[in-house]
Amino acid sequence: MFELSEHVTGRVRTGDELAVIKACEDTFITFCDLMDEGKVEEAAALHVEDLVFYDAGLDQPRIGRQALYDRMMKVRFSYPGRRTLHTPSNFRFHAVSQEAAECRVVIALMDLVKNPSGRGIGRYSTELLGYAAEECRFVPRDGRWLFQTRKVRFLAGAPRLPLGTLPGDLPWNEGA
């Protein structure tokens, strides 16, 4: 199973390390944006072909970009009209070199649901699904930093989800 290397708090980073960190953060944030826009194929392309993906609640990893794509299609389009918002934060980088970078990220996961009362600042309200922590390894490919390994673990979930159920496995908000 993938484990992050040790993290040294407060260590001064070199300019090269900071450039790698920024590129990896950009890849992660772009992945979230593409998923929220429903562009799953483009989001999957931010991963190496032989990706190792440890999905929440599973002991064995899914292997390959296609396996991730299939899972993300199910999650993103788990009910008609689903809209999502992924907000990554708390990026904490562990090992960083020109060959690979490892980090831990916390993500707030929300569904955007139509606001039936017409109140609020927009047509949609947010429904918090939960928080996840993700551990990642990135590698450089053709001038870009791509996901090589991802391990997802849910930290907390919305009370409406049965314990241990992933949001993509439940259809709700039909007709949104």
Image (cartoon, rainbow, N blue to C red):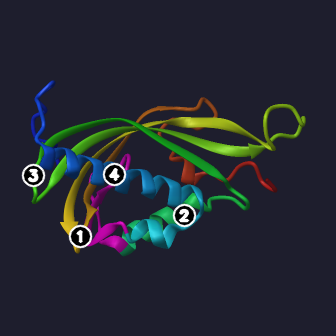
Rounded to the nearest angstrom, the CA distance separating label 1 from label 3 is 15 Å
Question: Is residue 150 toward the left or the right of residue 69 in the image?
Answer: left
Could you tell me the amino acid type at mark 1? Gly
Query: For mark 1, what is the residue?
Result: 143
Could you tell me the amino acid type at mark 2? Lys
Query: For mark 4, what is the residue?
Result: 58
How dense is the environment of label 2, judged by Cα within 10 Å: few (below 14), some, or many (20 and up)? few
Q: Residue at point 27% right, 40% down? A: 104
The vertical placement of 69 against 15, above or below, is below
**Of callouts 2 and 3, which one flags the residue occurring earlier in the amino acid sequence?**
2
Rounded to the nearest angstrom, the CA distance separating label 3 from label 4 is 29 Å
Rounded to the nearest angstrom, the CA distance separating label 1 from label 2 is 30 Å
Rounded to the nearest angstrom, the CA distance separating label 1 from label 4 is 32 Å
Q: Is residue 39 magenta?
A: no
Query: For mark 3, what is the residue?
Result: 97
Instruction: Locate residue 67, reporting x and y percent.
Output: 38, 70
Could you tell me the amino acid type at mark 4? Leu
Q: Secondary structure at mark 1?
A: loop
Residue found at the very far right of the displayed protein: 117
Instruction: Locate residue 19, reporting x and y percent.
Output: 21, 50
